[in-house]
Amino acid sequence: MNGKNNIAIGFLTMGLFMVYGFLLIYLRDFAPDAEEWANSYSIGKHFESRLAHVHGNLFAFLNILMGYLLLHFKDKLQNVKAISWLALAGLLMPIGILSEVYLGLPPALVLVGAIAMTASVVWMGIAFLKMKSIA
């Protein structure tokens, strides 16, 4: 793993969370209980669903960006494989939020994903600081 999978999985994940956005639009505007759904904007399933949508797209984008940078600088950065895997594991956060909303599961995946993504971003920043030269 040197970034290619981050780009591919990032785009696929972004596509899925964009489609999920259409479901959220349906629930807000067209579903039989749309008014009730809209009134619960900042609480419960509505709020959690929006969190999953936003974080799913953000973490997908981070994987695309990090994957590109890992591919481009793979010969100059250290720990490329570990950073790549951690960034992919970060996608467990929005998946975990959805598993809470729809399956009633505990938030373990949310925490694992959040920690993994944060670690990958910090580790990548450190790797770039330690990089000798870009040219």
Image (cartoon, grey):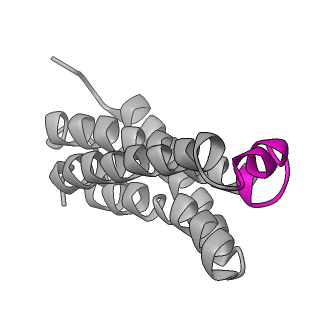
| Region rendered in magenta | 33-46
Q: Position of residue 106 (x, y in %)?
A: 72, 80
Residue 34 in magenta? yes
Count of numbered circles in the view: 0
Left/right placement of residue 100 relative to residue 58 reads right
Q: Quadrant of the C terminus?
A: top left
Q: Is residue 119 above or below residue 62?
A: below
What residue sits 35% from the left and 61% below the top? 82
- Residue, x 66% and y 66% (percent of image)? 111
Q: Position of residue 22 (x, y in %)?
A: 45, 44
Taking the magenta stretch, the answer to whether it contains residue 10 is no
User: In terms of depth relative to the viewer, which is nearer, 107 or 82?
Assistant: 107
Quadrant location of the N terminus in the rendered image? bottom left
Q: Quadrant of residue 97?
A: bottom right
Residue at the image point whose x is 31% and y is 32% from the top? 131
Nearest to the observer: residue 91 or residue 39 = 39
Q: Is residue 77 positioned above or below 36 on the image?
A: above
Majority secondary structure of magenta residues: helix
From this viewpoint, is residue 16 visible?
Answer: yes
Q: Is residue 31 left or right of residue 121?
A: right
